[in-house]
Amino acid sequence: MRVSFAEMEAQFLRVLGKLGFEDGKAAHCAGIFARNSEDGVYSHGLNRFPAFVRSVQEGLVNAGAEPEIVRTSGCIEYWDGQQGPGMYIASLAMGRAISLAKKGGLGAVSVRNTNHWMRGGTYGWQAAGAGCIGICATNTIANMPAWGSTEPRLGNNPLVIGVPREKGHIVLDMALSQFSYGKLQEYAWEERPLPVPGGYDGQGALTTDAAAIRSSRRVLPIGYWKGSGLSLVLDVLTAALSSGWSVGDITAAGGGSRLSQFFLAINAAYMDDAVVESIIGYTCSDAVNYPGERTLATRVRNQREGIPVNEQAWEALLAL
Amino acid sequence: MRVSFAEMEAQFLRVLGKLGFEDGKAAHCAGIFARNSEDGVYSHGLNRFPAFVRSVQEGLVNAGAEPEIVRTSGCIEYWDGQQGPGMYIASLAMGRAISLAKKGGLGAVSVRNTNHWMRGGTYGWQAAGAGCIGICATNTIANMPAWGSTEPRLGNNPLVIGVPREKGHIVLDMALSQFSYGKLQEYAWEERPLPVPGGYDGQGALTTDAAAIRSSRRVLPIGYWKGSGLSLVLDVLTAALSSGWSVGDITAAGGGSRLSQFFLAINAAYMDDAVVESIIGYTCSDAVNYPGERTLATRVRNQREGIPVNEQAWEALLAL
């Protein structure tokens, strides 16, 4: 079945109100969840919402918290997220980076003590929509072995880069594992092989068998040693710069809260749009998409036809 | 055989002087080439130097050129490299980004019309040495098919991130192909299989056969579709932001010159060094290196024992 954006957003709003979110913040968060589903990222929209509600009920996410500015240093601000709602703090942080960049060319916000930002792409689309190149990253719970190790001590720390473009923004939203655990589960359920090797089986051989990887917990970083190194560096960029929790700290605490994030905006006022078009024209084709192209196509379809929902998930939302 | 750093640097200096480099610029460039070899990146030190000399002799690289500031916008400067020596312009650009960051928290230089920067890591080490997190990228000639295509229309556009650390800087220097053509050639010569699949053979199957990949020219981006998207985005970040040449433009001209680059520095004055140590302590072990660790070990050994050189390459330098 499909539901309209307005209908979905209203249901999120209703539940957040019951949880004690004040009106403006509830609207802000409901919009982000609804847009994630509208963009086809159901895993971080409707399907994730009940887990978010639980994290508020359990006190991991503090509905009433507002981020505090710890320090300002030129074009960078350092924030403490006060364990507030991750998607709310992240969009405020990217918004502040955008304001700083509009004034000074560049702007950044380094955030500690925040929570899961749901879909990283949200903040890439946000920056691009405001005429900025946006770059952001978050750390996560440890879920991926470093290259050379068999024990998960790296996060799949997503990296997001958004670039404004009149015909459709370019938005790369890339976790550093080749496949998420959610994606592995889909393949395992359908008993389909992964399109490319996604990790190691119990014997230490590279495999396309999603169930074997889920059981060994040895998911591959993108590019093997390369993504492994990048993941470590993004943990440093998010956690050390903000004096926040690292992947190891988050994992030790067990809850997946108190994440560290980094948001950078570059004013794209002087970017040459003709060069962007020439790059897309040269590289892309019917068979080659630019990052964000399929998201935009999904959004347009879902705006026209309504957002497809899992009926069980929709009923669960109505019952909250 | 091994030669001392001073001996190698003096030979580079001698040749650059003959090519018409003024003294300060010759010393600057000779130092970069010698440090690349000292750090074990022989492919972009001694072994690359004759090709650099030819590019100057052929007029692709203009020894006398100095970069010009096209525009200043807050913490970002836009430069035209005037087709000068790439490693010279890149280190000036990162130097300027560092100065801007020391003053304003962040600094960036967007550069067009420059040339091959040799080893990207050079500028990550430079930023880290100055107490900044440095992030930089360059575009290249097209040498890698986009995901979904069989024709090389992406560059392996390196991404570099350097982080200052007292016990040894963290420096990630990562081209976006899984293996460089140089590395594929080594494996092909030695008739050894690659440690992981590096591209496709003539039948379109993933393979560890380096010779088959060299012949199909279908090298893999790191993370398949993920590195493919990141490569396109880095071309936009370097070329569109600087109004410079894109991968397609560079490739059409055939020479691999007039590259576009981007340099960002983040003042790390408020970075929490204890968090950096805790991340390395948690993630790394005898079997797991942090990015830059092996480079530093090689540097220390080469400083003690001299820089190992291919005798033929050394004789070729002496004859220049």
Image (cartoon, coloured by chain):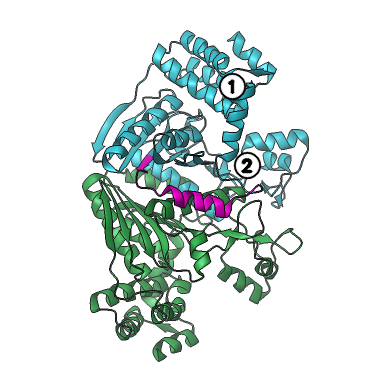
Chain colours: A cyan, B green
How far from the left and from the top, in percent, is residue A42? 61, 27
- Residue at the farthest bottom position: B319
- Read off the magenta span: A264-287
* Vertical placement of residue A219 versus B22, above or below: above
Which amino acid, by three-letter code, is at mark 1? Leu
Disc 2 marks which residue?
Answer: A179
Kindly state the secondary structure of the residue where label 2 is placed: loop
Q: Quadrant of the N terminus of chain A?
A: top right
How far from the left and from the top, in percent, is residue A122? 48, 32
Dot 2 falls on which chain? A
- Between A151 and B140, the one lying in front of the other is B140
Which residue is drawn at the image coordinates 35% and 35% (left, top)?
A: A98
- Between A223 and A166, the one lying in front of the other is A166
- Between A158 and B56, the one lying in front of the other is B56
* Vertical placement of residue A243 versus A52, above or below: below
- Residue at the farthest left position: B103
How far from the left and from the top, in percent, is residue B222? 58, 54
Which amino acid, by three-letter code, is at mark 2? Phe
Disc 1 marks which residue?
Answer: A46
Residue B139 visible from this viewpoint: yes
Dot 1 falls on which chain? A
Q: Viewed as shown, does residue B300 lie left or right of A255?
A: left
Res A175 → quadrant: top right
First along the sequence among labels 1 and 2? 1
- Between A47 and B82, the one lying in front of the other is B82
Q: Viewed as shown, does residue A139 lie left or right of B103?
A: right
Which residue is drawn at the image coordinates 49% and 19% (left, top)?
A: A30
Kindly state the secondary structure of the residue where label 1 is placed: helix
Which residue is drawn at the image coordinates 64% and 34% (left, top)?
A: A182
Is B158 covered by the magenta stretch? no
Real-space Cα separation, disc 1 to disc 2, in angstroms? 21 Å
